[in-house]
Image (cartoon, rainbow, N blue to C red):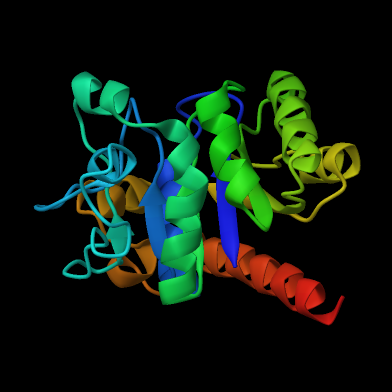
Amino acid sequence: MILAVAGGKGGVGKSTLSLNLAAELDAVVVDADLGMADLPGARGPDLHDVLAGRADPVEAVCESGPVDILPCGRTLAGARAGDVTGLVAAVEAVAGAYGRVVVDCPAGMAADAGMPLLAADASLLVASPRTFALADALRTRALARELDAGLAAVALNRAGKNPPTDQIRSALGAPVVAVPDDERVARAQRHGIAVRSLAPGSCPAERFSELADEVRFRENQSCRS
């Protein structure tokens, strides 16, 4: 299964969700934000090299960290040198070798954001709990539907007290899990590890587990159909 983690705006926490979901699902996480990579880097070839034809996608997966990752380069020149249309084949190759893949999508609605959704079997939408963010979430859901990456769940990230989960669930037609604004999430991300490794049994760790359960449910439904 290939899961695209998407969001209309930058800064909503897609990379955090991607890393933690990959840990929960025992998946490879692919950093597909070609111009603003935010997941841990690694020595060796990266996604820029893969898309420029200099490396094999499966061989570029780094297995030395707490989560297997196909990292992305950090340079603008590297981003420009690659052919973004090769992303679908690269992600599918990794999925063929490892089974599950979680793709951290770029922000926005441009072609580089659409490519991971084109490769995906399902999507997870990361949104802000603020009401005005709903319009961005609706546009991203529409793009995912158009590209056959149906919505498995919505993560309301950095949620405070009384997040609008019912409103978002009604508007987007998918399960909604509110991930609290918790310092342990940021601390785990800085160290490139999942929250469950830093604070097992904590509220955010439980929320990431709930999101993973929703993804598995979607995966099982797809297998039956």
Which corner quadrant of the image does residue 199 belong to? bottom left
Q: Going by the image, does 81 lie left or right of 136?
A: left
> Residue 76: image x %, image y %?
23, 20
Q: Kindly identify the residue that appears in the image at 70 percent across and 67 percent down.
A: 214
Q: Kindly identify the residue that appears in the image at 22 percent across and 37 percent down.
A: 73
- Residue 29 vs residue 210, the one in the foreground: 29
> Residue 212: image x %, image y %?
59, 68
- Residue 13 vs residue 70, the one in the foreground: 70
- Quadrant (top left/top right/bottom left/bottom right) for the C terminus: bottom right
Which corner quadrant of the image does residue 93 belong to? bottom left
> Residue 7: image x %, image y %?
59, 33
- Residue 144 vs residue 187, the one in the foreground: 144
Q: Kindly identify the residue that appears in the image at 74 percent across and 32 percent down.
A: 143
The answer to whether any part of residue 76 appears in the image is yes
| 101 vs 51: above or below | below
- Quadrant (top left/top right/bottom left/bottom right) for the N terminus: bottom right
